[in-house]
Image (spheres, rainbow, N blue to C red):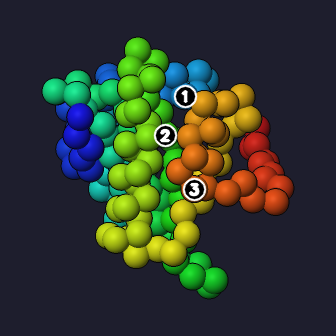
Amino acid sequence: MKIERLTRVSDDVVESLGQLMVQLAPDCKPLSGEYLQEIIDLPNIFLFVAKQGDQIVGTFSLVLYKIPTGLKASLEDVVVDVSRRGQRIGEKMIEFALEYANTQLEVSKLDLTSSPYRVAANALYKKLGFEQRDTNVYRFEFK
C-alpha cells in the first residue's frame, strides 16, 4: 500500500472518492471533478489517498490554517473502503498524517473530530495517541 498526495483529478479518482465519501457520510452530495480540483488547488488543503495497486482504498485530508492564536491543522474525512477494513490501512493513513503534519507542515497539534458511532475509528485514534478533549463542538446549519 502507498499513500500519496492527490495532485490531479481523473474520472477514476472522482468515482473512487465519491464512493468513499458516501461510506463516511451517506448524505454527501456527489463529487465532481471540478470540485475536487478546486480542493486540490487550495494551498492549505492536503488531500491524500491510500492505494493498493492502482485502486484507491482510503482517503484523508489535512487542513492547515493560520489564526491569531497560531498555525492550526485538522485531520478531516478519514475513511477506508468498507471492503478493505481490518487490514490496518486506517492505522497506516493516520500514522502518515501525523508524520506529515509534524515534519512537513510543522504544526505542534493536530485536531480531529469523529462521531461516537465510529467505534473502531475512535479506538484507533486513542491507540495512536490522540486524546479526547474536554470541549463542546457546536454546529449551526443554514437552511
Between residue 25 and residue 52, name the one nearer to us: 52
- Read off the residue under disc 2: 78
Q: For numbered disc 2, what is the local secondary structure? A: strand
**Vertical position of residue 116 compared to residue 6: above or below:** above
What residue sits 49% from the left and 40% below the top? 78
Label 3 element class: loop
Disc 1 marks which residue? 24
> Badges 1 and 2: C-beta atoms under 8 Å apart?
yes
Identify residue type, mark 3.
Gly
The amino acid beneath tag 1 is: Leu
Q: CA distance from mark 3 to mark 2?
A: 16 Å
Q: Residue drawn at (56%, 40%), measured in percent from left and top? A: 124
Q: Is residue 86 at least partly visible in the picture?
A: yes
Of callouts 3 and 2, which one flags the residue occurring earlier in the amino acid sequence? 2
Separation (CA) of disc 1 from disc 2? 8 Å
- Say which mark, if any, is on residue 143: none
Q: For residue 41, which quarter of the picture? A: bottom left
Kindly state the secondary structure of the residue where label 1 is placed.
Answer: helix
Side of 139 relative to 91 (left or right): right
- Residue 118 position, x and y percent, is 65, 30
